[in-house]
Amino acid sequence: MTPPMSGTGRFVRKIPGGKLLKLDAEYALGRLARVSIRGDFFAHPEEAFDRVEAALQGIDPVDFPRLLREAVAREGVIIYGVGVDDIVDAFERASDAIQVP
Amino acid sequence: MRFRFLETGAGTAAFNMGLDEAVLESVAAGAAPPTLRFYRWEPRAVSIGYFQGLEEEVDLDACARAGVDVVRRATGGGAVYHAAELTYSIVVPEDHALVPRDVLESYWILCRGVIEGLGRLGVKADFAPLNDVITGGRKVSGNAQTRKRGCVLQHGTVLLEVDVDEMFGLLKVPQEKLRGKLIEDVKQRVTSVSRELGRTVGYAESLAAFKEGFAIALAAELAPAEATERELARAAEIAADKYANPAWNRKR
């Protein structure tokens, strides 16, 4: 994946046998300015998932998979209906969906 | 085993979610025993899951026009239209013998109350992981769980009647051109107690069946009670501060 400089990409996928995952990735100056992970999945504790998401704001996008996994482990979040690998995949596809001028 | 049993009747969306949380607080504090609550929604309401985006899931203008409440739940899962249904919530300490540590297994254990209740009405149903109860391959009940303050809160709905067209008039769909197909698809996948039995089953009739069903599934004596003054006051506070607060409802 070559991270785009700017723009917002979205990827939506129903995980087979699981839940719906929607991810928005917003880039600014080559960094991940904002990421939003939504859907009808479950995560316990819910507020810890919010902190995982917050830890991904403003990062270098190449670090997304590592920082996501580290934050999930650090916060002790268990996600049901969507896997961490699904979120990484959705992030990469959302990033790829950004139209580069 | 003894459970407190509350039948709190109809409430607004914010109050209903506030009272579930207030009951969790009092069970967590040891001020109340494990509690089963049944309730309804007045006005009708759409609730969305903790992780859903409000504006992308709900047609807020349509809800406002129809006088339908909108609320974000403390639990995950999907959007639910609360109309002709029975809603329950159950609050149990996490270290209670009834509740396995494994979340998936605990869904199954607690959903047995729904399955037993449906059985008493004459609807044979099964648990469908992660969080549904189905009959004849169609969803008749959705359930959602959170764990806070050392307690499990699971709430869920049993569809007594379902109007998929009305429901989709209040929800947004990912691709407008596929709305018709999506509605037809949901009609195939969702059913209600009344549809299964070929007659109208109302809240009052279902109440007795599900009370009995949960008592059997939980192997519990259900002791009828009222929510305490403290719980009602906290429910009103939580409703105002959280569930009626746009900051909460629009957080995603």
Image (cartoon, coloured by chain):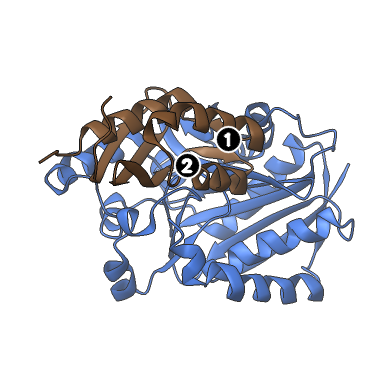
Q: Quadrant of the C terminus of chain B?
A: bottom left
Instruction: Specify the label residue A71 is tagged with.
Output: 1
Residue B6 occupies quadrant: bottom right
Q: Secondary structure at mark 1?
A: helix
Disc 2 and disc 1 on one polypeptide chain: yes
Instruction: Name the foreground residue: B148 vs B90.
Output: B148
Q: Is residue B87 left or right of residue B34?
A: left
Q: Is residue B22 left or right of residue B162?
A: right
Residue appearing at x 35%, y 40% in the figure:
A23
Residue appearing at x 29%, y 46% in the figure:
A29
- Precedes in sequence: disc 2 or disc 1: 2
- Compared to residue B18, the image places residue B92 above or below, namely above
Chain A visual colour: brown
Chain letter tied to blue = B
Instruction: Specify the label residue A56 is tagged with.
Output: 2
**Image coordinates for residue A9, horizontal then vertical, percent:** 25, 41
Q: Is residue B26 left or right of residue B126?
A: right
Is residue B6 at all visible to an observer of this figure? yes
Q: Quadrant of the N terminus of chain B?
A: top right
Q: Kindly report the distance in space between the C-alpha atoms of the residues bearing marks 2 and 1.
A: 9 Å
Q: Amino acid at mark 2?
A: Leu
Residue appearing at x 45%, y 27% in the figure:
A65
Residue B152 occupies quadrant: top right
**Image coordinates for residue B233, horizontal then vertical, percent:** 73, 77
Q: Amino acid at mark 1?
A: Ala
